[in-house]
Image (spheres, rainbow, N blue to C red):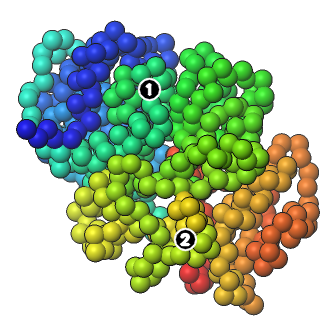
Amino acid sequence: MITPLTPLDWKRRAIKYYPNKIAVIDGEKQFTYEQFGKRIDRLSVALHKAGIRKGDHVAVMLPNTHYMLECFYGISQLGAAMVPLNYRLSANDLEYIINHSDAKKLIVDAQFAEPIEKVADQLSLRQIIIVSVEGYETSLDGIDYEAFLENIPVHEAPPEVEIDENLLLTVNYTSGTTSKPKGVMLTHRANYINAANFMYHLNVKHDDVYLHTLPMFHANGWGGVWAITAAGATHVCLRKVEPPIILDLFETKDITLLCGAPTVINMLVNDPKAKETHIKTNPRMATAGAPPAAALIQKAQEILGLNMIHVYGLTETSPFILYCEWKKDFDFLASDKQATIKARQGIELAFNGETKVVRPNGEEVAWDGEELGEIITRGNVVMAGYYKNPERTAEAIKDGWFYTGDLAVTHPDGYIEIRDRAKDLIISGGENISSTEVEGVLYKHPAVREVAVIAIPDEKWGEVPKAIIVLQPDVQVSKNEIIDYCRANMAHFKTPKAIDFVDSLPKTATGKLQKYVLREMHWKGKKKVN
């Protein structure tokens, strides 16, 4: 007998073996796995009675709350696909995504309803379900989430739906910068395999307490929405990323595991409360989304005692395809050398398939840590394609391989290390300059809190690097001092030729730097070299 691979089976298992275990903590509210399961089933029944069937799509725009977790399971066990929405997107982008995704219903948090209000008349939705939030009113015409559930008997079972592992589980839209957002189609199988990697490589155990710092709408919380349930561990919801609250939860909830982009790590280590926080659990923290600087990893380990785990992937790969496997030999290295290794993206995970770095002709680059190529992958976690967009699908998947657009080297031990996104690489006078390499050096300067390095036009060299820096509070340093520091710590041609000091850097909802926003200010009306 062949059983389809679906993360829904882990919900069944958790309720069977851990009915009285705390499944979800959300502020003052908490639910056992049995209670969590009943709320999920009531949502499924309510949606089914409201007309949702296998193959339908339901859009969801919620922060990291128990409602969001319920939607992942309650929608998908009907055989419907969930469309998680980034609540930081513009009204126009949200209108496009909701309509393009063919969503029949929208479940929205009242706090983030304003952009939906602006485009409500243009949405092809049959119904809006609103999660009420104290202090926030909305003019949307819809039904309250709890009212939607309250008439459903507690013990009424949802309809039995035959789930094929190749059925769509979610359609996750990537943010468009120069084009419309693309809907990444992820199946039950892809989500299952990715979550299995999450469990195995992040060492998820039954007694883990997982803090949802990473937005659940982003690649399904990297698989955490499924993996934590699979282990019967505890989900701790976090409505907003606020370092003092996170540091407090480390102590009061004994957090053992979390995930987040490097900017979240930066926020934590630089918070005034960080050095006063006494964390007993030595939490594991997986980081991805942008290549983290070794100096930042070192700070996280030394200041907060976080055990950093570097992972890598994309929404199109569910998302994990690499992780930085730690070997006992590394334990004997100095802390800065350990951090340098942890900054590498690493090797293939156990279940995802094959990943390698290749030349333009498709041949694998030399394992010398020097030759630059593009990361490509194939296997169990690659998307089924972009929803209603065969042209962009064909551009991304060629000859059975997904092309990531990330440029990297492969070290002699097989560890892959990203040097840049193809669009972020700086080509100055014919020389390739990795923006992340320059950023890594700058992060070691004690005055630097955050930094982004971009290419700017130059009459002589075509383009040259520029560093945009957020300084540590109450620290003064000149632009010339920063340039002198760089010249002393890297090849002169890589040294930024211009420096700007700013109060903040543009970021996505998941904390990734938006370098294109910075570049646009310099390249408007000009053609970039690469």
Residue 134 appearing in the image: no
> Looking at this rendering, what residue extends furthest in the bottom direction?
460
Instruction: Looking at the picture, tell me which residue is in the foreground, 297 or 124.
Output: 297
Provide residue 355's location: percent of width, then percent of height.
Answer: 41, 62
Sequence-wise first label, 1 or 2: 1
The nearer-to-camera label among 1 and 2 is: 2
Q: Amino acid at mark 1?
A: Lys
Q: Residue at x 78, y 28 (%)?
A: 275
Q: Residue at x 52, y 62 (%)?
A: 414
Q: Which residue is mark 1?
A: 205
Q: Residue at x 25, y 23 (%)?
A: 13
Provide residue 221's location: percent of width, then percent of height.
Answer: 42, 40
Residue 254 appearing in the image: yes
Provide residue 249's location: percent of width, then percent of height.
Answer: 60, 21
Figure quadrant of the N terminus:
top left
Q: Amino acid at mark 2?
A: Trp
Q: Which residue is mark 2?
A: 367
